[in-house]
Amino acid sequence: MTTKSPRRISILGSTGSIGVSTLRLLDETGRLGEDYVIETLVGGRNVALLAEQALTYRPAITVLADESQWSTFKELIGNSGLEIACGEAAICAAAARKADWVMAAIVGIAGLKPTWAAAGTGAILALANKESLVGCGRALIERVESHGGKLLPVDSEHNAIFQVLEPAQRARVSKLVLTASGGPFLGRSRDDLKAVTVEQALKHPNWSMGAKISIDSATLANKGLEFIEAAYLFDMPASQIDVLMHPQSVIHSMVEYDDGSSLAQLGSPDMRVPISYCLGWPERLAWQAPKLDLAARGTLTFAEPDLTAFPMLRLAREALETGHGMPIVFNAANEVCVQAFLDRRIAFLQIAEFVEAAMMRAQLPSIPFMDHASRDTNDATVTRVLEIDSDIRRLVSELFASAKLSA
Ligand code: NAD
Ligand code: MG
């Protein structure tokens, strides 16, 4: 009898919402140590949790991003004999280590370099960090595939589409339908959104997530990023992607075929479900998954998105249609504005106003664009994306300054 060696698992962003759900799922399989071993854990700032995870799961290496907490981290790890490191270069080196399965769950464009490094290893790349894909476009997918790996979408909508899109019937797909819960402000008018607070915006009705994606869900920027993500993942034009409001988050997305059939994936709003699909792929993982009780839920409802109250969805679509580097502009401006909103420097509606202003200014010839449809898997692609990202961060700071906000 041959014994299979355990799969080596790396988790980039292990202390975040997705990272913690991934470790929980691994625990729940009861197969850690036998079927799975942890190769790498990467965390940003939460040293206490990262140290606790390292001591529990004993990865080959644990890396902390925040250099100012290095000495605290070292103390917490003590003389446990664990290998630890700190800083961005160490994160990228750890992400480039040979693993079988990598969860890319760092938030924002900060995840790009580590995700890119992992994409060059030939591992299965479970991608939660949508901002990386929005930044690099098809080049990230090409990089994974050209190294013999496979990119699997963790985002529940894209995971749903991945599950029901039959590759052999790809040519018969007429629409991808992304469902959207609408976040905490669904149904509100633009006027009703003027004075909403950070606390209200952070309170997602169905999902428990990190702060940035929670605000993105409240503005519908998250659905906008997902619109772009879907176009790249499934090679679909904007005209064949629809967004459908569905507050119960039961149908995670749908594929409409040209013979009139629509196939959907349903599930509880629990990220362990799409994560488990990625972990088990190409099979399905056996675990005590939360099951749907549709009779108890009763009603599922649907509506068109309100693009007047939630312009971020329209702006994302425009960014995709403009192409070149415009999705990078949309993403960078949004990241800066979300942080400014969380810091209470701008109001909720100003997020979209500043993003739109940045997109208009970025069209000036002074912003050199990369060809965003490029499939160039060279490292220069990442350098270029990050240059545009920095240019746009500077531009938004200037826009804040001229609006008399502190940069
Ligand atoms: P989070 O804020 O809870 O966690 C982010 C993780 O990234 C943390 O471990 C943090 O320490 C780490 N991090 C932050 N900055 C870093 C840096 N500079 N270097 C290294 N690590 C850093 O976020 P989340 O909700 O888990 O989301 C993670 C990603 O997954 C995002 O891109 C998000 O859009 C996507 N996603 C999340 C959900 C969800 O339900 N939370 C669903 C779909 C997609
Ligand atoms: Mg999603």
Image (tube, rainbow, N blue to C red):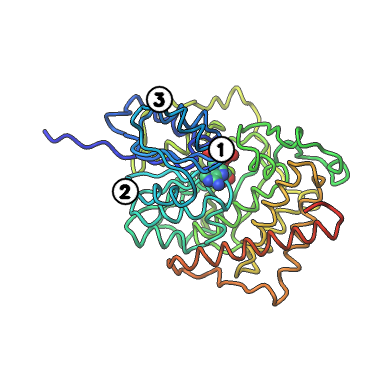
Query: What amino acid does circle 1 point to?
Result: Arg
Residue at image location 61% in from the left, 68% down from the top: 323
Between the residue at mark 2 and the residue at mark 1, the CA separation in whole angstroms equals: 25 Å
Query: What amino acid does circle 3 point to?
Result: Glu
Q: Residue pushed farthest bottom?
A: 365
Which residue is more in the foreground, 103 or 242? 103
- Location of the N terminus by quadrant is top left
Q: Residue at label 2?
A: 98
Q: Give the number of the disc on residue 28.
A: 3
Callout 2–callout 1 Cβ contact below 8 Å: no
Q: Residue at label 1?
A: 45
Q: Give the number of the disc on residue 90.
A: none
Q: Position of residue 208 (x, y in %)?
A: 61, 32
Left or right: 26 in relation to 302: left
Residue at image location 78% in from the left, 57% down from the top: 354
Residue 376 is at least partly visible in this image: yes
Of marks 3 and 1, which one's residue comes earlier in the chain? Answer: 3
Single out the mark in the foreground, 3 or 2: 2
Residue at image location 81% in from the left, 40% down from the top: 188
The quadrant in which residue 46 appears is top right
Q: Secondary structure at mark 2?
A: loop
The quadrant in which residue 399 appears is bottom right
Q: Secondary structure at mark 1?
A: loop
Left or right: 186 in relation to 2: right
Query: What amino acid does circle 2 point to?
Result: Lys
Q: Position of residue 332 (x, y in %)?
A: 65, 57
Q: Position of residue 305 (x, y in %)?
A: 73, 48
